[in-house]
Amino acid sequence: MEAYVLDPNPTAAAMAAAPSLTPRARSRKKKAPTLRERDWAPYKDQIINLYDSGMPLKRLKATVEAQTGFHAEYVCFHRRR
């Protein structure tokens, strides 16, 4: 069995090679910007009509972006109804 001895005066190279005891911070996905009511209002009726007509959400999003340049995440389409 191998014994480990702690060096009371470790060198900089030894410190850099030693694994960190602190947990790594998880990188979080960047939050989407908040969609304000004034930004949503001009497109709301058109989006609701397309959605109610049975258009799949993926196609609806692409259609609205192509026709108006309005970009929103899928969550925005669901929440604002």
Image: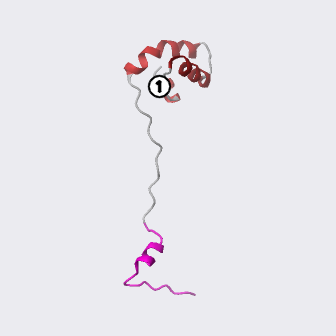
Q: Residue at x 47, y 16 (%)?
A: 43
Q: Position of residue 3 (x, y in %)?
A: 51, 87
Q: How many marks?
A: 1
Is the stretch drawn in magenta largely helix, strand or loop?
Answer: loop
Any magenta on residue 6? yes
Q: Residue at x 54, y 22 (%)?
A: 65
Magenta residues, start to end? 1-21
| Dot 1 amino acid type | Arg
Q: Residue at x 41, y 84 (%)?
A: 7
**Quarter occupied by residue 56:** top right
- Choose between 57 and 81: the one closer to the eye: 57
In the rendered view, tell whether residue 72 sits above or below residue 7: above
Q: Residue under circle 1?
A: 79
In the rendered view, tell whether residue 55 sits above or below residue 31: above
Q: Position of residue 6 (x, y in %)?
A: 43, 83
Query: Around disc 1, counting alpha carbons within 10 Å, would you say few (fewer than 14), some (14 to 19), or many (20 or more)?
Result: few
The quarter of the rendered structure image containing the N terminus is bottom right
**How did the renderer colour the structure?**
secondary structure
Left or right: 53 in relation to 81: right
Q: Secondary structure at mark 1?
A: helix
Any magenta on residue 17? yes
Q: Residue at x 44, y 38 (%)?
A: 31
- Choose between 12 and 73: the one closer to the eye: 12
Q: Position of residue 75 (x, y in %)?
A: 50, 29
Q: Position of residue 36 (x, y in %)?
A: 38, 24
